């Protein structure tokens, strides 16, 4: 979930058939969403945890509904360090709200750390003027200081 809150560009690609791939500039993360398949059982997911978990999806009208589980415990849910356990699952609803606007609403379920499910909402504007660039932590990179909340270097 923390990846959704970063100010760097990302792309969503639907190819090959049966798969949606999200490509993030930050840390060169790649997230594969398998379409039309069920989420494996907890016992299968916990055996092979991953930073972005294991995601499956389906379309509900014009909304891509993504269910994810199998996160490793080396990550945080947000920039403040909100923890999670290995039973964390998320459901994202990804949809275009206009030709240039994307909305992602994510529901977090983690009975080990939270007494009830909670949600976060992210909105994005299409930027055809940007392309994903190389990202090397610690090196001079894209200037994002114009984005609200980002400090100047």
Image: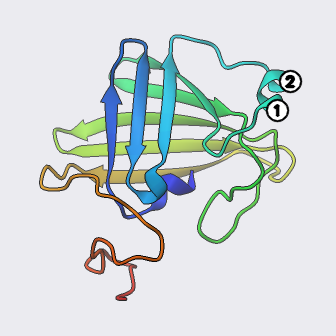
**Quadrant of the image occupied by residue 53:** top right
The outermost residue toward the left is: 129
Q: Is residue 106 left or right of residue 130?
A: right
Q: In this view, does 55 lie to the left or right of 136?
A: right
In this rendered view, identify the residue nearer to me: 62 or 135.
135
Residue 130 in percent (x, y) is at 18, 56
Looking at the image, which residue is at 53% across and 29% down?
A: 66
**Quadrant of the image occupied by residue 149:** bottom left
The 10 Å Cα crowd at callout 1, few under 14, some 14 to 19, many 20 or more, is some
Looking at the image, which residue is at 16% across and 38% down?
A: 99
42 in relation to 49, above or below: above
135 in relation to 138, above or below: above
In this rendered view, identify the residue nearer to me: 49 or 125.
49
Q: Is residue 16 left or right of residue 3?
A: left
Q: Quadrant of the C terminus?
A: bottom left
Q: In this view, does 63 lie to the left or right of 114?
A: left
Q: Which label number is shown at residue 46? A: 1
The 10 Å Cα crowd at callout 2, few under 14, some 14 to 19, many 20 or more, is few
In this rendered view, identify the residue nearer to me: 28 or 147.
28
Q: Which label number is shown at residue 43? A: 2
In space, the residues marked 2 and 1 are separated at their CA atoms by: 5 Å
């Amino acid at each position: 979930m923390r990846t959704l809150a970063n100010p760097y560009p990302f792309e969503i690609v639907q190819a090959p058939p049966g798969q949606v791939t999200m490509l993030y500039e930050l840390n060169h993360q790649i997230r594969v969403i398998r379409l039309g398949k069920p989420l494996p059982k907890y016992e299968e997911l916990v055996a092979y945890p991953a930073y972005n978990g294991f995601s499956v999806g389906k379309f509900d009208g014009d909304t891509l509904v993504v269910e994810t589980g199998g996160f490793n415990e080396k990550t945080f849910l947000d920039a403040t360090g909100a923890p999670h356990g290995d039973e964390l699952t998320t459901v994202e609803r990804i949809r275009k709200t206009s030709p240039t606007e994307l909305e992602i609403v994510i529901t977090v379920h983690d009975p080990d750390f939270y007494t009830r499910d909670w949600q976060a909402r992210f909105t994005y504007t299409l930027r055809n003027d940007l392309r994903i660039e190389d990202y090397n932590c610690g090196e001079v990179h894209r200037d994002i200081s114009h984005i609200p909340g980002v400090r100047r270097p």
